[in-house]
């Protein structure tokens, strides 16, 4: 038997403890929880491993994160959306979440192993990465932004990730197994407990993690981008103005520069040279544009299964980031 | 050396008898400078005027949050536009109504109010660089001329000279009359100059480039 019998899940103290720790209701069966812990590398039988559940869970996680980001920050550049998706529900983040939940891995999968342990075939040190993990489908010569949005995963990778079903009996790293467990758990929660509870689970375990979007930007030519933005939106051309300064002739001068469009201040930055302060102020102004947050947001999933659609308010759709 | 000198001075000192009485004087260099001048008067905004507990709002100066959207960047149908406008009008009225205390008069360090937003005024700070209007005055004939001169003698007609002659920017000259051979030559010269740098200068330049990359990352 490659994986423990479902009957043994009822006797497992680890599984009961995990269910209680995650505050899951009693009607969520322990047998399903045990199944989410079995990676296809441990048990190739799709009826006993978590491959199908993790496909469903990955789609749900991607959907809820994407709608949260796109509705709350409609002007975010696509690169930042990809990076934020990766930070919220990327493989690394999911592996960290699994370890925070106290998931431990079995040294070797098998039928006699305690069902509360994560089971997968380990990648031995020195072995190369197996071909299934390196598979690149769909594969193109020119990887465009559109290709990254529509053809691959939600993190904007140039290639699609390997399908969980293709990893049967293939040795995998720990991170891959841990992320498949978290995804499978979300998928099984959706099947057993329904969407509202999954949304609450997602909010308390994934969205509650602190992520400062304002630190994910990397501007190379903010002054040029900002003047392009002002021309596009019909504002007056931005002008850098010196708000205050100290120690101009000293070793550590500080200049505070504001970027003004007409009489409105768009951004403010401080630096040890006039150029640096101007650069930072332009970057701050661009961030202020991109991080705009509408006041009343209704995400599309909030109206799922509801007959009353009067609460729905259409979300803002921005015309896109600045292209120079 | 110095000790010898002072010792000699002490030994041979014959003080001229002065008619002035010997009175001990205290200069600013002693107690006054160290103790009294350093006790700064408390800011009036911190001094409670009423015996009952009061609320003091005086936030420290810090960089504005990136999540605050300026009025100009708000969409037309956003509710915050009306809120900002009403707040601006009330704060202006309040600023005009409240009398400034003499300690916080303009020209003193306390003149800048700690309330947000600051008192609106028609005066904008001075620009860092003088703003200019783009002229768009060069015709096709001028551009042909620029290209001809640049191709004819790139050493004499550099980008700077052409920009001065035609009243445009160097960037524009580089755009319309690109000279690959000259650019390669200049790049080679720069490379040669960089090869002569010592270790300290090379590292310093490298660090400067790295710091400059961090400007756009707000780090």
Image (tube, coloured by chain):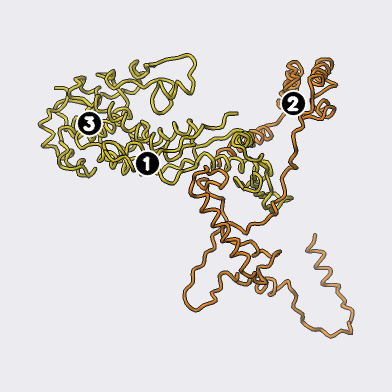
Chain colours: A yellow, B orange
Q: Where is residue A138 in the image (x, y as percent from the top left)?
A: 39, 16
Check disc 3 and report its element: helix, strand or loop: loop
- From the viewer's perspective, is A277 left or right of A205? right
- From the viewer's perspective, is A68 left or right of A172? right
- Residue located 54% across and 60% down the image: B59
Q: How far apart are marks 1 and 2 (CA)?
A: 48 Å
- Numbered disc 3: what chain? A
- Residue located 66% across and 63% down the image: B109
Q: How far apart are marks 3 and 1 (CA)?
A: 34 Å
In this view, A247 is above or below B33: above
Q: How far apart are marks 2 and 3 (CA)?
A: 63 Å
Q: Where is residue B152 in the image (x, y as percent from the top left)?
A: 84, 15
Q: Name the mark on residue B172.
A: 2
Check disc 2 and report its element: helix, strand or loop: helix
- Quarter of the image where the N terminus of chain B is located: bottom right
Pick the residue in front: B75 or B69.
B75
CA neighbours of label 2 inside 10 A, class few (<14), some (14 to 19), many (20+): some
* Residue behind mark 3: A37
CA neighbours of label 1 inside 10 A, class few (<14), some (14 to 19), many (20+): some
Of badges 1 and 2, nearer the viewer stands: 1
Q: Residue A230: name its quadrant.
A: top right
Same chain for the residues under marks 1 and 2 in the image: no
Question: Tag 1 or tag 3, which sits nearer the N-term?
Answer: 3
Same chain for the residues under marks 2 and 3 in the image: no
- Numbered disc 1: what chain? A
Labelled pair 2, 3 in contact (Cβ < 8 Å): no
- From the viewer's perspective, is A114 left or right of B55? left
* Residue behind mark 1: A298
- From the viewer's perspective, is B111 left or right of A305? right
Q: Position of residue A122 (x, y in %)?
A: 28, 24
Pick the residue in front: B181 or B22.
B181
Q: Position of residue B151 (x, y in %)?
A: 80, 15
């Amino acid at each position: 038997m490659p994986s423990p019998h479902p009957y043994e899940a009822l006797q497992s103290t680890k599984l009961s403890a995990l269910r209680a720790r995650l505050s899951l209701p009693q009607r969520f069966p322990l047998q399903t929880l045990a199944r989410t812990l079995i990676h296809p590398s441990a048990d190739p039988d799709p009826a006993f491993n978590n491959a199908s559940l993790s496909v469903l869970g990955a789609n749900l996680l991607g959907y809820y994160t994407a709608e949260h980001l796109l509705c709350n920050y409609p002007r975010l550049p696509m690169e930042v959306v990809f990076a934020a998706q990766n930070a919220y529900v990327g493989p690394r983040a999911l592996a960290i979440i699994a370890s925070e939940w106290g998931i431990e891995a079995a040294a070797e999968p098998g039928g006699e192993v305690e069902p509360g342990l994560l089971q997968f075939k380990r990648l031995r040190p020195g072995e190369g990465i197996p071909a299934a993990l390196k598979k690149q489908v769909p594969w193109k010569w020119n990887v465009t932004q559109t290709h990254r949005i529509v053809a691959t995963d939600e993190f904007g990778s140039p290639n699609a990730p390997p399908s969980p079903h293709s990893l049967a009996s293939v040795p995998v790293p720990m991170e891959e197994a841990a992320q498949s467990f978290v995804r499978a758990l979300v998928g099984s929660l959706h099947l057993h407990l329904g969407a509202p509870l999954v949304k609450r689970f997602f909010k308390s375990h994934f969205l509650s993690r602190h992520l400062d979007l304002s630190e994910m930007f990397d501007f190379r030519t903010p002054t040029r981008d900002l003047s392009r933005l002002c021309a596009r939106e019909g504002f007056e051309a931005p002008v850098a103005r010196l708000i205050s300064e100290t120690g101009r002739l000293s070793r550590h001068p500080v200049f505070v520069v504001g970027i003004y469009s007409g009489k409105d201040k768009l951004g403010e930055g401080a630096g040890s040279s006039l150029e640096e302060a101007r650069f930072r102020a332009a970057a701050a102004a661009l961030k202020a544009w991109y991080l705009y947050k509408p006041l009343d947001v209704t995400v599309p999933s909030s109206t799922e299964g509801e007959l009353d659609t009067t609460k729905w308010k259409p979300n803002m759709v921005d015309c896109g980031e600045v292209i120079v | 050396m110095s000790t010898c000198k002072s010792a000699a001075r002490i030994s041979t000192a014959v003080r001229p008898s002065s008619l002035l009485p010997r009175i001990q004087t205290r200069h600013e260099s002693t107690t006054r400078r160290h103790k009294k001048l350093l006790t700064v008067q408390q800011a009036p905004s911190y001094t409670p005027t009423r015996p009952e507990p009061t609320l003091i709002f005086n936030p420290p100066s810090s960089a504005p949050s990136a999540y605050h959207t300026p009025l100009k960047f708000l969409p037309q149908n956003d509710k915050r536009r009306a809120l900002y406008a009403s707040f601006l009008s009330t704060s202006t009225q309040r600023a005009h109504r409240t009398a400034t205390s003499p300690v916080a008069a303009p020209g003193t360090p306390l003149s800048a109010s700690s309330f947000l937003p600051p008192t609106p005024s028609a005066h904008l700070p001075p620009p860092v660089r003088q703003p200019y209007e783009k002229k768009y005055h060069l015709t096709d004939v001028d551009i042909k001329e620029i290209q001809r001169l640049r191709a004819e003698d790139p050493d004499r007609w550099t980008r700077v000279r052409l920009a001065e002659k035609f009243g445009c920017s160097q960037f524009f000259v580089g755009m319309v009359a690109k000279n690959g051979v000259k650019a390669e030559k200049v790049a080679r010269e720069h490379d040669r100059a960089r090869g002569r740098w010592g270790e300290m200068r090379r590292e310093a330049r490298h660090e400067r480039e790295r710091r400059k990359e961090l400007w756009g990352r707000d780090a």
